[in-house]
Amino acid sequence: MATLVTFHAHPDDECLRTAGVMAKAVAEGHRVVLVVATRGEVGEVPEGFLAEGEQLWERRVQESRAAAEILGVARVEFLGYRDSGMMGESTNDDPECFWQADVEKAAEQLAAILRDESADVLTVYDDNGDYGHPDHIQVHRVGLRAAELAGTARVFQATFNREFMQRGFESAVEQGLMPPEAAPKPPENVEFGKPEAEITAAVDVSKYVGVKRAAMRAHPSQISEDMFMLAMPDDAFAFAFGTEWFIRAGQGPGITETDLLAGL
């Protein structure tokens, strides 16, 4: 049995980026640990969604734990930093936010968990944090340093396959599976994911898309039923989320790996 540690910025990120490999690892008898840097305090929530006196972070922590149970995660840890919000917002300046965290100190927090778990594999994000979110970029920086400190040699950077994603949305619109206005478009001057040529690992998680979708539904404060991810027909969802993409330094060129835990 190997141990996979997945490091994420906010509650719900785990479902969108690595839920498939997490569920796959559990199904194959491995141990999965989820570490979340923040409690998602700056997320948006519909008016009236929270109970009287309830804080958003409280709900989001509950949602992460519920999603983790669905995925079969053995341990969930929060590092305790505050959500930094989107890049350029005033919340980036909060001294308690993850974007302002000392990388060495935060890395040691994560490294302590990696050592305690004798982690075999760690997932982080790519160097642009998928789309330039400050907390996601910090996950990349802190995660790589933590792996160095703990001696965790196998580190995968979760990312989106930019060309695959664009092809998928175009195909869904052409087939009438998604109206053109529903196809998400990145904001101007923001790059999502990485070019296909930079990706070194593609994991087929199509067997686990049902579990992945159920885990997404465990985050109703952030992922409502009418959002495109849950509103997609089953076939379109399976196409869009049935593969998870990663970059591993020293691998490639091209996709050379299809299993994060191969050989362990």
Image: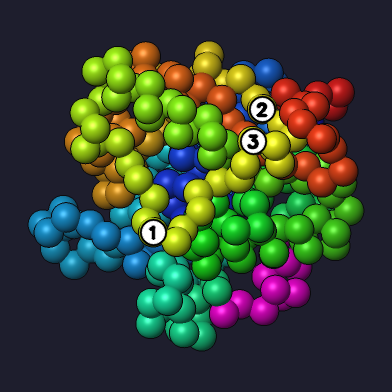
Residue 149 vs residue 86, the one in the foreground: 86
Q: Label 3 amino acid?
A: Glu
Residue identified by numbered label 1? 188
| For residue 165, above or below residue 92 | above
The quadrant holding residue 27 is top right
The quadrant holding residue 196 is top right
Residue 115 vs residue 206, the one in the foreground: 206
Residue 126 image position (x, y, % from top left): 64, 52
Segment colored magenta:
100-111
Q: Judge from the rendering whether residue 183 lies leftward or rightward of residue 255; answer left or right.
A: left
Residue 184 image position (x, y, % from top left): 33, 41
Residue 109 appears in the picture as rendered: no
Residue 49 image position (x, y, % from top left): 16, 53
How dense is the environment of label 3, judged by Cα within 10 Å: few (below 14), some, or many (20 and up)?
A: some
Which residue is at 78% across, 63% downward?
145
How dense is the environment of label 2, judged by Cα within 10 Å: few (below 14), some, or many (20 and up)?
A: some
User: Which SS type dominates the magenta stretch?
Assistant: helix
Of the residues under marks 1 and 2, which one precedes in the sequence?
Answer: 1
Q: Judge from the rendering whether residue 129 lies leftward or rightward of residue 10; answer left or right.
A: right
Contact flag, marks 3 and 1 (Cβ < 8 Å): no
Residue identified by numbered label 3? 196
